Amino acid sequence: MSPVKSLNRTRHELSEFVRQRRERVTPAEVGLPSGSRRRTPGLRREEVAALAGVGITWYTWFEQGRDINVSETFLLSLSRVLKLDDEECCHLFLLAQQRPPAYEARQASGVSPLTQAVLDQLDPCPAYVMNLRWDLVAWNGAADRWFRLSDRADAERNLLRLVFRDAGLRGRMPDWEHDARRLLANFRCDLAVAPEDPTMLAFVDEMRRLSESFRNWWAEPDRQGYQRGISRLAGKGGRVQSLRHEMLIVDEHHHLRMLVYFNDETGNGAGGTVPAVSRP
């Protein structure tokens, strides 16, 4: 396919995508009266133009797929007006021949019932779901027994906060410094996904203020590698368990990852059954 034909097809796809999303949004969702004389579903072009801060003629040309230059500011504004999620916003940028902006660290407050059912089915293997800021937004019974998450306030349900601030958990981690340094190094990689997100930056500032170790290691270049989970943990009677963990993507566009822990005593686990992890 020639470049011209490919570009024309992309412009047609852009036109169809924007029109369909415009017709999906109701006036009430953007604070406009519904009225009784609307001939088309959703928003009118002039309403979208006004909400996005551009002229109606210019917006019409854009929706028609004409060859005009658009800015990142306009595309982000249009994404908000059309109520696009992260995936749709990224698609809009690509159709408009623009590089998608960096994702914000959207802090999901929970998971779907089906994802929670998966977590529950994994018990007795501890498993939890965390977001880009490493907040633990869902977990199963085994993870609750490890970290007592049900008894904690929402702000305390964060893996880095638990590792660096919870003296009880620290006392059960024989390799605390090794694990804490590597977890922090991995979190630094996640910060690079949304380096200007205010919630991420506020969390880093708070942890630097609350933990001397966090503050000192944050200022040092990493030389020890990366990891997302704890490597060893003392359980009942002080028995130390060596652990492996596997990360699964729950929602790529909201940066939700599931961490599942396995007892390392069973070996590599290749071709075997899922090993149980005893209660701490």
Image: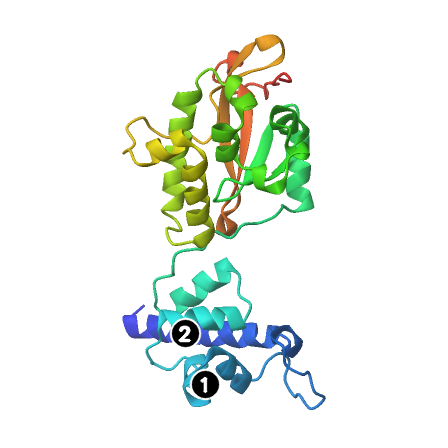
Left or right of 173, for residue 111: right
Q: Residues within 10 Å of mark 1 (few under 14, many from 20)?
A: some
Label for residue 74? 2
Which residue is found at the position 55% from the left and 74% from the top?
Answer: 20
Frontmost of labels 1 and 2 is 2
Is residue 123 depicted above or below 25 in this figure? above
Which residue is found at the position 43% from the left and 55% from the top?
Answer: 103
Point out residue 195 in the picture as x, y percentages from the top left corner.
Answer: 37, 51
Which residue is found at the position 53% from the left and 33% from the top?
Answer: 259
Point out residue 109 in the picture as x, y percentages from the top left corner.
Answer: 61, 48
Q: Looking at numbered disc 1 in the image, what kind of residue is underneath it?
A: Thr
Q: Which residue is mark 1?
A: 60
Point out residue 138 in the picture as x, y percentages from the top left corner.
Answer: 62, 39
Which residue is found at the position 40% from the left and 51% from the top?
Answer: 194
Is residue 237 depicted above or below 75 in this figure? above
Q: Looking at numbered disc 2 in the image, what kind of residue is underneath it?
A: Phe
Left or right of 61, for residue 153: right
Q: Residues within 10 Å of mark 2 (few under 14, many from 20)?
A: few
